[in-house]
Amino acid sequence: MTFDSVSWLEQARALIGPAHVLSEAGGDDVSAHTRDWRGKFQGRALAVLRPGSTAEVQALVRLAARSGVALVPQGGNTGLCGASVPTADGLQAVLQLGRLNRVREIDAENNTATVEAGCILQTLQEQAAAAGRLFPLSLGAEGSCQIGGNIATNAGGVQVLRYGNMRELVLGLEVVLPDGECLDLLRGLRKDNTGYDLKQLFIGAEGTLGIITAATVKLFAAPGAQAVAFAGVSSIAQAVRLLGALRGHLGERFTAFELISGPAVALVRQYFPETPAPLSGDWPWYVLMEAADGGSDEVLREALQTALMACLEDGCLEDVALAGNLAQAQTLWTLRENITHAQQLDGSNIKHDVSLPISRIAGFVEQMLAQLPQAFAGARPIVYGHLGDGNLHFNVSAPPGVAPDAWQRQTEAVNQLLHDAVVALRGSISAEHGIGQLKRDEMALYKTAAELAVMRRIKQALDPQGLMNPGKVL
């Protein structure tokens, strides 16, 4: 039987209202929903569907199941691996969840929040803060990314060192399954030992097993004090020693430990010339670190200063600057956040998001810095990331004079060089960005046959029609 798209769109409009069913056929501009923000993936959509409740999501999923229309769940569309972009055939419908944006409950006594999938991360942060609590997930896109997408990609960010990534922050989920049934797992419990922990199936699954519509997440006591410092080190091995020493000095107060290469700092200062020099001298590697607790800024800064002075004496760092106030601290964090923007301004680069045992990171980077120039003359590594949890963004910018398209054609070869080394060291080719369509084929090369078989069996059991974000992950 021939698929009647006109009839299908009319059925969708009847379910959620004409204003919330967008399509090219109807004269709507849906381009913001059919390409990723990097411009790397471009698709077409049968429609962009904007449900306003869990019940409307259920109704749309049932319609899709009856008609065999695949659904691509989409939050803020800020991902880096193309998971929220439809294919080019125009037969998939984008399920945009931005209207499900309520914070349903802040339970301060239980230190939890129940929030809908379309809620902007920054909104949850602000509402938690208004209740005297902290939601600790923090990343560059927090003003536009949505909670459902954070969960679907198991987002990380700068405070994983203390609080863990999204998987550690989720206590419960509400999920619409591929047949339209709602799985209500919204329990704000730290202990629930009643069989399989079903919510874990959907965290990091990138919408391939069901549609996350709400979540119950952990909150924490809001920190009363923060202290930030920026250090220069001569090697990554020295930075690793500094990490261990500061953990010993500061314990749970230690919240972030970011590694930044000298070339990354130079690139930021090139494209953002108002950026002040963080230290008086130049170092091959830098560390941006933060501590937080419930006391006063002055007392915490003194504690961090004492720890850093001890590290200087022990040879764990070469030079250090301690932010004296909030403005200085923000300037240091802005330098870190502007690395991505500087790379965009600089031209084409091949991005990597890898994780390794912390003890093996120094050896991996030394190996890559030696092998890359031999394999790709003039290639410029820009290395930074969350050293405290073993996550590196090892990006490789194009050699001078090489056109962006020509450099991007080297992606497969560059990836193979880096990812072979990562996997040989028992690391992962995706630390916090997910798989999407960008790394789908690569994952098949590096996962074991047994792992892939189990993943496919789970997919088949929950989504036998293959309508939940097909072509992503598997």
Image (tube, grey):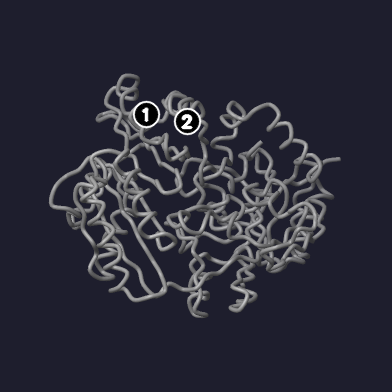
Foreground residue among 308 and 72: 308
Please tell me which residue is depicted at 52% across the width and 39% down the height of the picture: 430
Q: Which mark is residue 249?
A: none
Q: Amino acid at mark 2?
A: Val
Task: Tell me which numbered mark, 2 or 1, is placed earlier along the sequence.
Answer: 1
Give the answer, above or below, for where 260 lies relative to 451.
Answer: below
Give the answer, above or below, for where 413 lies relative to 125.
Answer: above
Q: Which mark is residue 422?
A: 2
SS state under label 2: helix
In this view, which residue lies farthest toward the right?
1
In this view, which residue lies farthest toward the top?
374
- Answer few, some or many: residues within 10 Å of disc 1's Cα (few below 14, many 20 plus, some between 14 and 19): some
291 left or right of 207 in image: left
SS state under label 1: helix
Please tell me which residue is depicted at 60% across the width and 54% down the height of the picture: 167
In this view, which residue lies farthest toward the left?
280
